[in-house]
Amino acid sequence: MSLAQYAAAEVSLGERGYKIFVGAGLSGRVGEVVAASKPEATGCVLVTSEPIDGLYGETVAASLRGLNPRTFVVPDGEEAKEWENAGTLLGRFLDAGLDRNGVVVALGGGAVGDLAGFAASIYMRGVAVVQVPTTLLGMVDSGIGGKTAVNHVKGKNMIGSFYQPIAVVADPLLLRSLPIREVRSGLAEVVKYGVIADEALFRYVEKNTKRLLGHDQACMSHVIGRCASIKTGYVEEDERDDRGVRAALNYGHTLGHAAEKLASLGLRHGEAVSIGMVYAADLAVGMGLMEPEESQAQRRVLEGIGLPTKLPAAIKADELIRYMRRDKKAEGGRIRMVLPMGVGSPPTLRMVEESKLVEAIGEVT
Ligand SMILES: NC(=O)c1ccc[n+]([C@@H]2O[C@H](COP(=O)([O-])OP(=O)(O)OC[C@H]3O[C@@H](n4cnc5c(N)ncnc54)[C@H](O)[C@@H]3O)[C@@H](O)[C@H]2O)c1
Ligand SMILES: [Zn+2]
């Protein structure tokens, strides 16, 4: 099949525009994607982490052989985003003689993608980057949209840039080696897209949960493609996340981030978002914004995926609220949350009374 047939979505941002290719087996065609997206490329580097290199490094490197790729292995998981690793990686780019016509290929989860994207954005004032996400979260969220970041000891994602890739390649076959908990966690973001923007996607996930968890390639590709085009729409309207449009993508994340932080390593990101969406929907029902049946349907789908829907007992309401006051959407210490207006309808950003929140935390059983 020609590459063009795999283009599931396109980010229309003029010179910074790019395509998102989705399809089984595409990790062996990254070289073709680079050639199509940047024909003048003269060299390339592959940035990945140890476990991913062992699984898929060779396939991707082989597809890039015309550009003599050098592979650089960075620490795995969140450790990749330690500030020092950006400096080390930039040094390696220099040693490899990567020039301004070079391409950085980021192969890994959101952490590797964020680090490699950040390094590419500042190396020689910016060289092209292709994102090849290997987690479901990466394919439906972090790989698309151009947010790059590393962490500072004083805060996560505090150093970064907006820097769009020249292409994104999502190969659902890579998800087969992903621990099932990570797949479930990624599906929480998929449900999020369904609730905020696409009822058909929501129903599709509801109907095909088993197939998705069983790695049915056609189902997975369909879902990734839908999410990619939904995210693309938000990115086009609000590239730098300063017009309030991208805030909708934060559905489930205000309470979710606080729970994720407080549970420390006890909750995966998507699990925390799942819990956050359940509480946000409960609040929305209480405020007359959403029908109770829709909130129940959301909960059913999340439970069907095997995601948690209730805060761990160890998390106390007052601690959680203290955290939520620090959220970027809070205003003057007052909590603002993205609340759903139904399944498939654009959500709304609302101030939420802390007393209502305490009630909701007590209510969800
Ligand atoms: N840039 C953005 O817009 C954006 C959006 C959301 C999240 N993020 C960032 O993404 C990061 C989280 O990303 P993540 O959830 O992908 O986690 P991750 O990158 O930390 O990867 C999780 C684990 O899964 C393993 N893994 C990845 N792919 C695999 C595969 N195919 N098979 C087997 N194992 C595999 C990794 O080795 C790692 O141990 C966070 O740092 C977050 O801040 C960025
Ligand atoms: Zn998220």
Image (cartoon, helix red, strand yellow):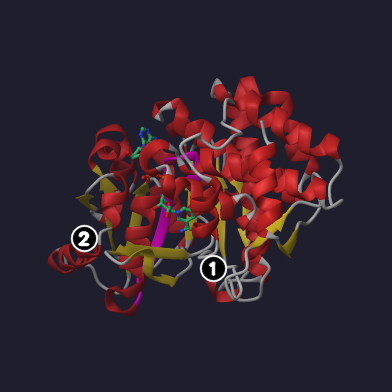
336 magenta-colored: no
SS state under label 1:
loop
Q: Is residue 95 left or right of residue 20?
A: left
Indicate which disc residue 210 carries.
Answer: none
Residue at figure coordinates x 72%, y 43% from the top left? 194
SS state under label 2:
helix
Q: Looking at this view, is 167 or 112 the one in front?
A: 112
134 magenta-colored: yes
> Looking at the picture, how far across and down is residue 352, in whole percent?
70, 60
The quadrant of the rendering that contains the C terminus is top right
Q: Answer yes or no: do the residues labelled 1 and 2 have beta carbons within 8 Å? A: no
In the rendered image, the residue lying farthest to the left is 95
Q: Looking at this view, is 300 or 313 the one in front?
A: 313
Q: Looking at this view, is 61 or 278 the one in front?
A: 278
Q: Which residues are magenta?
A: 126-137
Q: Amino acid at mark 1?
A: Lys
Q: Which residue corresponds to mark 2?
A: 85
Q: Alpha carbon of mark 1 to alpha carbon of mark 2: how far?
A: 26 Å
Q: Which residue corresponds to mark 1?
A: 328
Rate crowding at label 2 as few (under 14), some (14 to 19) or many (20 or more) other CA atoms within 10 Å.
some
Task: Tell me if residue 205 can be seen.
Answer: no
Mark 1 or mark 2: whose residue is earlier in sequence: 2
